Image: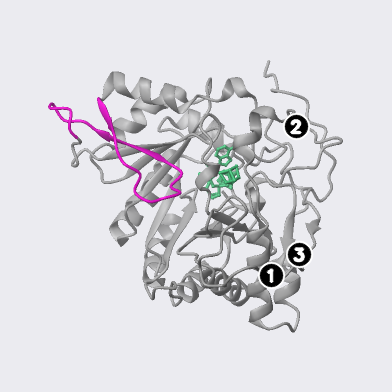
Amino acid sequence: MTTKPFNRTIAVIDQRPRSLPVPVAPVSGALDGQSTDTLGRPLRDLRISVTDRCNFRCSYCMPKEVFDKDYAYLPQQSLLSFEEITRIARQFISLGVQKIRLTGGEPLLRKNIEVLVAQLSQLRTLDGTPLDITLTTNGSLLARKAQALKDAGLQRVTVSLDGLDDAIFKKMNDVDFPVSDVLRGIAAAQAAGLGPIKVNMVVKRGTNAHEIIPMARHFRGSGIVLRFIEYMDVGATNGWRMDEVMPSADVIALLQTAFPLVALEAAAPGETAQRWGYADAQGRHDTQAGEIGVISSVTQAFCADCNRARLSTEGQLYLCLFATQGYDLRALVRSPKPDGELLEAIARIWQGRSDRYSLLRAALPVQAADGENTPRRVEMSYIGG
Ligand code: SAM
Ligand code: SF4
Ligand code: SF4
């Protein structure tokens, strides 16, 4: 008999939270890319969710029991248009954003996504350099889309893949999607020059931990950076349990039994992954073999350097992956207000930011699985990973 991890009683209602009022206090200081939040963190990275829909039902993100045929996805008119997204992105860039990641849901399901990429790729950062534009995908449509995305100006992609064993992967994506099609997508992205490619593997103890070494062996020496992500308590529907989290320290210890590793410096401030290089016989980094990364969102909070903002599919601005409420930028962008007001609003919101959920996690009460009496945390598929 199959047993469910817990009982979910989630009403078929719109689970998206209400928005916070955009603050009206005057902006302190110059709007010149030096704006920082209350903890001194600059704004550098914007993640844009382009759809709340997905063709996978990963149990840790969009469990089938909740995201079923009755689930209330956003109607088309709620979605920000590509022009609205580009206009909002331009204001973020004026405040210091240098990197944009398109995500979702599954971003390649958004019709003509390459048109948005082409619009964003025209933008320049404050120092006049091209934006760093990337996209996170489950890889299912990548073989078809890789070349068009590259031609439109996309620089690189991150592909999610939770194992090489078909049975495990199919169990995790819960739609019977085979590993081989994702690998074909990765190969197409490589051929199109969408690199360096990163592959994200969410590790769930008891589900796919035994895929860690096979995955490392497969991608070692390929030029692809494999990153192991701790299973997170994001959203309110995945039935997260701490005992299913495999700490990154354990992942590294396991990998070291097969491949000696050396710790590497962070490539950029605010980088979420800790980098490890495959070591040569002298214990130095073997650059031909490449590197792996671990993202320890649960066991080692990286809030102190968190320079990321998230724009939901319908234009809500979220300041943290674990936020319960966002700020309605769509109302502003659809009003006759000029760009200056949009810019000031975003600056004010960022300057008031104090979010640091992962740092505080240990001290917080565990959120009820069905969210009763607690503000419902926003879902990862809505806000974008
Ligand atoms: N659909 C695309 C994909 O899967 O790559 C983009 C959106 S997905 C929400 C972005 C990333 O979040 C993926 O790499 C996914 O594995 C990760 N993710 C989703 N739920 C997670 C969870 N509960 N814990 C850790 N990572 C998670
Ligand atoms: Fe879809 Fe990505 Fe979430 Fe999996 S992790 S359900 S592919 S949005
Ligand atoms: Fe950033 Fe929130 Fe994650 Fe901390 S918990 S790193 S503030 S998104």
- Residue 217: percent from left, percent from top: 29, 31
**Separation of marks 2 and 3 at Cα, in angstroms:** 28 Å
Q: What element carries label 1?
A: helix
Per the rendered image, the range of residues in magenta is: 260-284
Check the image and report above or below for 82 versus 231.
below
Comes first in the chain, label 2 or label 3: 3
- Residue 30: percent from left, percent from top: 57, 72
Q: Mark 2 points at which residue?
A: 367
Q: What element carries label 2?
A: loop
**Separation of marks 2 and 1 at Cα, in angstroms:** 31 Å
- Residue 121: percent from left, percent from top: 43, 73
Q: Is residue 264 magenta?
A: yes
Q: Can residue 383 be seen in this view?
A: yes
Is there CB contact under 8 Å for labels 3 and 1?
yes
At 64% from the left and 60% from the top, the residue drawn is 351
At 71% from the left and 44% from the top, the residue drawn is 67
Q: Nearer the viewer, residue 38 or 163?
A: 38
Residue 88 lies left or right of residue 236; in this view the side is left
At 65% from the left and 49% from the top, the residue drawn is 354
Q: Which of marks 2 and 3 is in front?
A: 3
In the rendered structure, find residue 23 and report the number of the disc placed on it: 3
Comes first in the chain, label 3 or label 1: 3
